[in-house]
Amino acid sequence: MATIAEKKWIAVLAALTFGILAVSLAAECSAAASRYPTRPITMIVPYGPGGGSDLSARLIAAYASKKLGQPVNVANVIGASGITGTMQCLSANPDGHTLMVVGTSNSSFLAASRADLPFKLEDMKWMGQWIADPQFYLFSAAAPFKTLKEAMEFAKATPEKFSWGAGAQGSQAMFQGLVLLNDAGVDIVKTRMVVFPEGVAASVQATLAGTVMMSTAMATDVDKLMPTGKVKVLAAITKERLTKYPNFPTAKEFGYSNAILMSWYGIAGPKNLPQEVVDVWDKLATEAAKDPEFQASADKMNKALVFLGPKEQEAYVLKEYADMKTLAEKVGVRK
């Protein structure tokens, strides 16, 4: 039989053993959380290759792959004006290994233009905004006007003859066009608004081909297409003239003060993502904002760094949605 002294030592040893096990277990759990990601990440782009969402995804994925120690693979999931890819992400296992690039076209603008969406903005877990695309009003070279003012006067006088590419339903191209036409006092319902389910890239190609008079385009499109002589830029959709494009006036200079919508891009995932996953991507975005290499890569793609944390991103999107929903209802394009 153990003595009282021996029993005391047994109790001390048991306590020490329990403490060591507890510390070990805590360390193991912490290590498990810090191991994310444990396998390759799929980053869904709900649109086709070549558009703003696709290029932004590839920029972010390249940076994240280097920093996270796992490949981040971009997957273009096309269909239903961005809904198919968005739903694929939102219905995925919420472990952080299936995410998506989120922008105006598959969040605020899409929700503003569609009352029948199979998801709500609240179903997304916001993980931070990274970059934005400077945008321009791009016209076919065959369009019979030299300034944006002339184009809007034409549209106001003969709306049924004014054709414009709206990208996919709810895209930034659609709302950038709607804001401009609304500011100009055009009867939007009578214009020939052409929706391209494939996305904005198809809308730009239609402008190049002369199928439509106007679309909106990002800087990479402008740089690539202007030398062809088949298109012309009549205004930038920015608050001020861009340093790289000093000869392009802003729409605001012609009196269209609301035509300054920003085409932003960030990361989102299924609603029930662990906070640890959100924190990893929030930290990654913060580091990217200060990384000269990432800045240089963004510059090459003519993208601006416009970072917002997850909470700030969510607040921004919900306000943008409310504003665009009001416009969509006013002009009758909300389905």
Image (tube, rainbow, N blue to C red):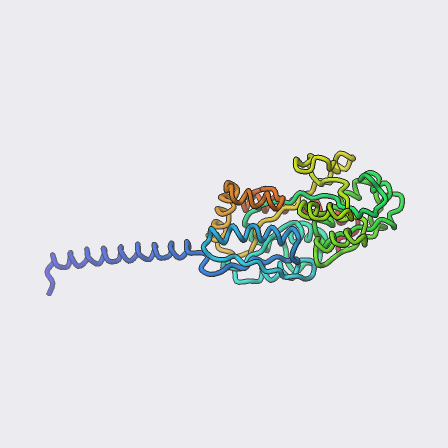
- Residue 335 percent coordinates (x, y): 75, 56
- Residue 135 percent coordinates (x, y): 69, 44
Q: Is residue 305 above or below residue 9?
A: above
Q: Residue at x 61, y 44 (%)?
A: 303
Asked if residue 224 shows in the view, the reply is yes
**Residue nearest the viewer, comparing 75 with 85:** 75
Marker count (numbered):
0
- Residue 306 percent coordinates (x, y): 59, 42
Q: Quadrant of residue 248?
A: top right
Q: Residue at x 80, y 44 (%)?
A: 181
**Residue nearest the viewer, comparing 104 with 76:** 76
Q: Quadrant of residue 1?
A: bottom left
Asked if residue 325 shows in the view, the reply is no
Q: Is residue 187 left or right of residue 203?
A: right
Q: Spot the residue most to the bottom.
A: 1
Q: Quadrant of residue 15?
A: bottom left
Q: Residue at x 53, y 52 (%)?
A: 62
Q: Is residue 97 left or right of residue 205?
A: left
Q: Residue at x 81, y 49 (%)?
A: 213
- Residue 143 percent coordinates (x, y): 83, 46
